[in-house]
Image: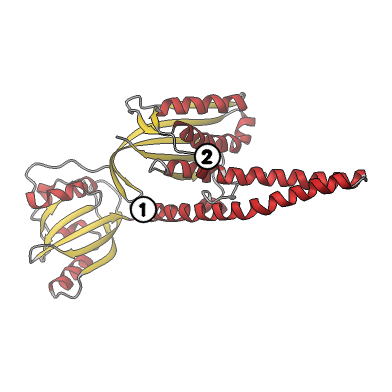
Amino acid sequence: MVFGKKAAGANPRFQSFDLLSTLIAVVNRDGSVLFANAGLEDALGTSRRTLEGSQFGACFHEPQVLRTALDGASSNDFATLRYEAFLRRVNHELMPVQVTLAHGDKKGELIIEMSPLEQQVRQDREERLIDQAQANKELIRNLAHEIKNPLGGIRGAAQLLQMEVESRDLIEYTQVIIHEADRLQTLVDRLLAPHRRPHVVGDVNIHEVCERVRSVILAEFPRDLHIERDFDVSIPEFRGDREQLIQATLNIAHNAAQALAERRAAGDAQITFKTRVARQVIFNKQWYRLALELHVIDNGPGVPDTIKDRIFYPLVSGREGGTGLGLTLAQTFVQQHHGVIECDSVPGRTDFKILIPLP
């Protein structure tokens, strides 16, 4: 989300509202506008000079709802009121917003804060991902340790038993036990890997990361897969763990390449690496002046609806035979850089977006 620029002539008392991503209007109790922040100007397509002094109710699809809220404020029926409404925008469709109405510092002034519902949903989803990632981390650690201890005993007992038995058939059974114990040990090691490995910080060029991932993917899928580059070369280097970011991007790109099996057979499979600089953004409940946007986009069938809300959960996979760890590890590595991964998927286009703060 991008903030609007500060307009000249704004009331100095309210200029700090221009730093907020939400839409802000300060009104009198009669609904006349005292101030509109830059975000509201951009959203409505109307200058603050035009808005100031006008009736703010006219900016809503149902003005009477705001009028009722203002009347309630005048009679001190509430301290803060929230409701949903639709904003009118010049030459645009109505914008659904969550409206929060609160008393200002001066008597007779009211602050109206409007969050686009899409933005509110995104913030709620980010909060759930943060909580989910922390819960996953604790679950994985505890589960891995609980599995690892008896696993060693099972494998050791099978080895001792194999030395005692003479029947070839029985030896095959003990070998199955040992093989499966080793397979589970490998899985446990992968679960614990991101929590064991030290965070090695250095200068990272995101395009070098993309090129490394591209070469690995093309080595595994050398035919019928085209990887497009759409880079913003102005993106600066930043401090981070290069190997972790390579692994995170590789996990996403590898999933994409595997999901493109039908497209590869048809000869039109494509993955796009796109980088951009996002300005004035909020994620993980923090505001950042600049952030890296790295998109990994494919033209595959999309993420199945049955797992869309759970794709970052451990052991959840949309592919038969998949471990369901790739995206979990990718999210862990990105979160260690104070970033987040978002997914937007429909049939024919899946976009995984990595957001990481820039200096």
Quadrant of the image for the C terminus?
top left
Residue 325 picture quarter? top right
* Camera-nearest residue between 280 and 24: 280
* Camera-nearest residue between 31 and 94: 31
* Residue at x-position 20% and y-position 73%: 78
Where residue 30 sits: x, y (%)?
Answer: 10, 65
**Residue 299 in sight:** no
In the image, taking residue 135 as reference, residue 2 lies left or right, namely left
Q: How many labels does the image show?
A: 2
Residue 223 position (above or below residue 348): above
* Residue at x-position 9% and y-position 41%: 8
In the image, taking residue 90 as reference, residue 50 lies left or right, namely left
- Inspect the image, locate mark 1, and give the three-letter code of the amino acid beneath it: Gln
Comes first in the chain, label 1 or label 2: 1
Residue at the spot of label 1? 123
* Camera-nearest residue between 99 and 244: 244
**Residue 359 in sight:** yes
In the image, taking residue 66 as reference, residue 52 lies left or right, namely left
Residue at the spot of label 2? 348
